[in-house]
Image: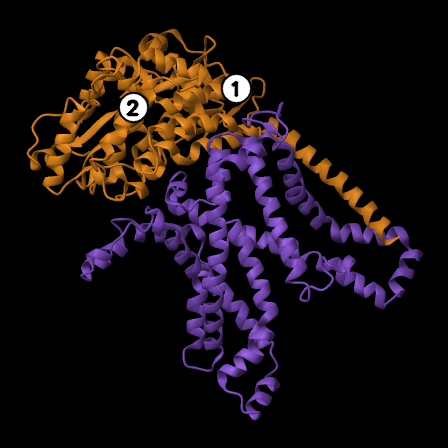
């Protein structure tokens, strides 16, 4: 009697619960972006500038777009960069995706596209010419463009000219041997040579990527995109070279627990406060450093040089690696999403973007606005580079990128060798 | 150790007491059973109304996710759309073959054991001390309990800043003329786990002390008076009277501590970040799950790890309840086997 009653109650409640979840599931999928016919359109917009000029730039640009397009309302949500990937994935899974979201192309975006979660961005002719095919190729999946590049972010080594002078270094290192000599000079002058935010792992992995860029040919890098096998000897060579370089102890004390961008103790903060002389980073670094200097102004003596040459590699001399910051439209976004992205690519807004983020605009029309010393050098190298590879973690997707990150941290901590990096990638493939 | 998980577990383990208490009541008083017979549907409605909200929440947010995790764990799934690539038990095979998981499991075991060994005796002594009448007792009680109330994120951020290689602790050591004592508190694999244990002990000992203090209040004063008349010394009294009568409290505390230690996530994740925990030797099953499931976007695999974590915790919890908590929670889970 008693048991039967409980059973009945449970059954009734279970059905109730199922009905509840079913209802909520149905309503949320249609909730995020309702484009009423000819009426008001509202969109949500995720970017990663939580403070300062970048945040203000997006607020102003959105306000201008709304003024130019009555009836369109864009709700901005600024999300901390390290949280972006996870939150976006959760939002895409749950059907509450933002209409406009930050994307960096490569394998990560391809995964989203393959799952049918992104829609083609209709790029207008003027923007296409101004940006050029190279930048769009990172956002192209099966011949269609799924994202609008806003800035080009090639990587290289940022350094403090003052600290170099203090250590008696003239000129910038052209080879790894030069770099090692400079590291020694800085150490002799009691200056931490290279800041590294290994707590976030990807800055550590960048060192491996650049050694791989020098060791592997462009064809090898591209081939790994499809087969995700890292059997070529150049992958091990890159790991060995990084291990040998890290044996010279070039990184700041406690680099394993140093984060990349948060606060004065982060690697960007160390450079901003003259606590370390160099940092290997993408072209967003001058902006991050500017926000971490004592007076929150750009670092006056910031310089830049490309990653040094490595002997015996198959990578073309002058090849660069970097990323692109761009934005994509999710599958349920209204057509106004493409419209907004084209709007933000106009010369005026691209110049504003480059100024606000202290970085390089994707539109060539807006490049004249770049005047900060370090960025001028980056741009010059970029325009000369025979090819520019995407960051390998972006290129090879989240799973391989995650494994590379963890493998490189282990290598730098002295707990693994170059073979272990390749093995960690193979292990990760089993989990995919 | 994790607040939310720990409390969730507490709710789950204490809920069986509800039905059992009702069962005892039914046995003693037969009248409610007769009332059911008279007004069946009214009674059912009443039960549905009263138990309904809790049941709906429990089923939607506890049972359904557990079942879904078990389901997803059989797939290779990138997290988009419904899973289609059924792989059977392969995710589980991968987990048990993965040396990184073995490491995480070992770290969990160390944390479980050390939490009991470090916090237990210290908390008993502190509770005995704070049970004495003395000046400033309530201030000390509050101070010991404060770390437990402070959020894990704040504790983690604070300690990670202090223990960094260039942080306050090493700075203090240098200023105090002990530069040779400075070490990599967080990144040296030999030391990191001890740094973690220090933080855990500091954070959670207040909880144990408060529990034990409450337990001490429940020991009848007459026993101490009788012992005093018989000429027992202070330590004899504690050993023969206080400790045995504090037993149920200690056993429950040890249970909560073990479950918390198995599910430890937040402190490690905040202090060591997403990647360094495995390198520093402080990774736990929960951080392994997040790194290899969420960060790598292998959601099927991550769900399988969640199931393994759940099963390990469940086995430990049931074993402990069956053999250690048996007398304390008489009837909760052991009822049928009596």
Per the image, the residue denoted by label 1 is A334
Please rate how many residues cluster around mark 2, counting C-alpha atoms within 10 Å: few if below 14, some from 14 to 19, many from 20: many
**Residue pictured at 75% horizontal, 53% vertical:** B50
Distance from disc 1 to disc 2, alpha carbons, whole Å, reads 45 Å
Task: Say if labels 1 and 2 share a chain.
Answer: yes
User: Is A38 drawn above or below residue B201 in the view shown?
Assistant: above
**Residue pictured at 13% horizontal, 39% vertical:** A187
Residue A71 screen position, x and y as percent: 49, 23
Sequence-wise, the earlier of marks 1 and 2 is: 2
Horizontally, residue A353 falls left or right of residue A158, namely right
Residue B314 screen position, x and y as percent: 63, 49
User: Is A325 drawn above or below residue A315 in the view shown?
Assistant: below
Which one is in front, B73 or A139? B73
Residue A271 screen position, x and y as percent: 21, 37
Circles 1 and 2: CB atoms closer than 8 Å: no
Please rate how many residues cluster around mark 1, counting C-alpha atoms within 10 Å: few if below 14, some from 14 to 19, many from 20: many
Residue B272 visible in the picture: yes
Residue A301 visible in the picture: no
**Residue pictured at 53% horizontal, 72% vertical:** B213
- Tell me the chain of label 2: A
* Figure colour scheme: by chain
Outermost residue toward the right in this view: B38
Per the image, the residue denoted by label 2 is A238
Horizontally, residue B170 falls left or right of residue A69, namely left
Residue B97 screen position, x and y as percent: 52, 35
Secondary structure at badge 1 equals: loop
**Residue pictured at 64% horizontal, 44% vertical:** B62
User: Is A413 drawn above or below residue A101 in the view shown?
Assistant: below
Q: Which chain can be seen in purple?
A: B
Colour chosen for chain A: orange
């Amino acid at each position: 009697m008693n048991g039967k009653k409980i059973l009945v109650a449970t059954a009734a409640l279970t059905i109730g619960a199922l009905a509840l979840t079913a209802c909520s599931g149905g309503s949320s999928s249609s909730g995020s972006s309702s484009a009423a016919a000819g009426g008001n359109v509202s969109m949500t917009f995720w970017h990663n500038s939580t403070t300062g000029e970048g945040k203000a730039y997006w607020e102003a640009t959105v306000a201008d777009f709304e003024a130019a397009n009555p009836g369109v309302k864009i709700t901005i949500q600024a999300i901390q960069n390290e949280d972006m990937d996870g939150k976006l994935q959760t939002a895409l899974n749950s059907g509450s995706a933002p209409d406009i979201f930050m994307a960096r192309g490569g394998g990560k975006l391809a995964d989203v596209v393959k799952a049918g979660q992104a829609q083609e961005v209709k790029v207008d002719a003027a923007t296409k010419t101004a940006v050029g095919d190279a930048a769009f190729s990172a956002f192209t999946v099966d011949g269609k463009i799924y994202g609008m590049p806003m800035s080009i972010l090639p990587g290289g080594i940022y350094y403090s000219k003052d600290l170099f002078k203090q250590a008696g270094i003239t000129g910038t290192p052209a080879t790894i041997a030069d770099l090692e000599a400079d590291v020694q000079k800085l150490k002799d002058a009691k200056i931490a040579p290279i800041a590294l935010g290994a707590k976030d792992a990807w800055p550590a992995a960048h060192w491996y990527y650049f050694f791989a860029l020098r060791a592997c040919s462009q064809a090898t890098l591209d081939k790994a995109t499809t087969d995700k096998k890292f059997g070529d000897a150049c992958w091990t060579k890159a790991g060995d070279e990084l291990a040998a370089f890290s044996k010279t102890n070039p990184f700041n004390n406690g680099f394993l627990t140093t984060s990349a961008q948060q606060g004065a103790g982060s690697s960007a903060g160390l450079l901003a406060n003259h606590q370390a002389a160099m940092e290997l980073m993408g072209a967003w670094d001058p902006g991050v450093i500017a926000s971490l200097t004592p007076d929150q102004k750009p670092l006056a003596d910031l310089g830049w040089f490309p990653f040094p040459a490595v002997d015996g590699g198959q990578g073309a001399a002058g090849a660069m690696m970097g990323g692109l910051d761009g934005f994509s439209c999710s599958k349920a976004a209204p057509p106004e999403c493409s419209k907004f992205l084209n709007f933000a690519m106009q010369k005026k807004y691209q110049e504003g973007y480059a100024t606000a983020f202290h970085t390089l605009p994707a539109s060539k029309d807006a490049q004249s606005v770049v005047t900060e010393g370090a960025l001028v050098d980056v741009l010059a190298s970029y325009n000369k580079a025979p090819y520019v590879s995407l960051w390998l973690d972006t290129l090879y997707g989240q799973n391989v990128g995650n494994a590379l990150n963890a493998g490189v941290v282990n290598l730098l901590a002295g707990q693994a060798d170059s073979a272990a990096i390749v093995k960690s990638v193979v292990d990760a493939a089993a989990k995919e | 150790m994790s607040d939310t998980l720990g409390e969730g577990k507490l709710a789950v383990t204490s809920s069986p007491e509800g039905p059992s208490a009702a069962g005892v009541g039914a046995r003693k008083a037969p009248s409610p059973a007769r009332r059911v017979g008279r007004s069946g549907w009214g009674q059912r409605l009443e039960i549905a109304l009263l138990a309904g909200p809790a049941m709906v929440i429990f089923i939607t947010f506890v049972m359904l996710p557990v079942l879904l995790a078990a389901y997803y764990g059989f797939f290779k799934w990138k997290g988009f759309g419904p899973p289609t690539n059924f792989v059977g038990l392969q995710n589980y095979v991968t987990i048990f073959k993965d040396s990184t998981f073995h490491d995480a499991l070992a770290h969990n075991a160390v944390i479980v054991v050390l939490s009991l060994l470090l916090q237990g005796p210290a908390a008993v002594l502190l509770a005995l001390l704070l049970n004495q009448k003395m000046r400033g007792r309530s201030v000390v009680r509050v101070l010991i309990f404060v770390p437990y109330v402070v959020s894990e994120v704040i504790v983690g951020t604070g300690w990670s800043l202090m223990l960094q290689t260039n942080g306050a602790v090493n700075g203090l050591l240098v200023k105090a003329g002990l530069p040779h004592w400075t070490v990599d508190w967080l990144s040296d694999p030999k030391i990191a786990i001890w740094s973690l244990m220090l933080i855990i002990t500091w954070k959670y000992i207040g909880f144990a002390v408060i529990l034990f203090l409450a337990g001490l209040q429940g020991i009848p004063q007459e026993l101490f008076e009788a012992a005093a008349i018989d000429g027992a010394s202070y330590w004899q009294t504690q050993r023969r009277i206080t400790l045995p009568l504090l037993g149920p409290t200690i056993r429950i505390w040890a249970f909560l501590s073990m479950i918390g230690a198995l599910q430890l996530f937040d402190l490690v994740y905040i202090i060591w970040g997403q990647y360094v925990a495995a390198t520093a030797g402080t990774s736990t099953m929960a951080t392994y799950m997040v790194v290899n499931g969420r960060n790598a976007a292998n959601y099927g695999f991550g769900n399988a790890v969640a199931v393994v974590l759940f099963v390990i915790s469940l086995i430990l919890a049931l074993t402990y309840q069956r053999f250690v908590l048996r007398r304390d929670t008489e009837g909760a889970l052991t009822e049928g086997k009596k």
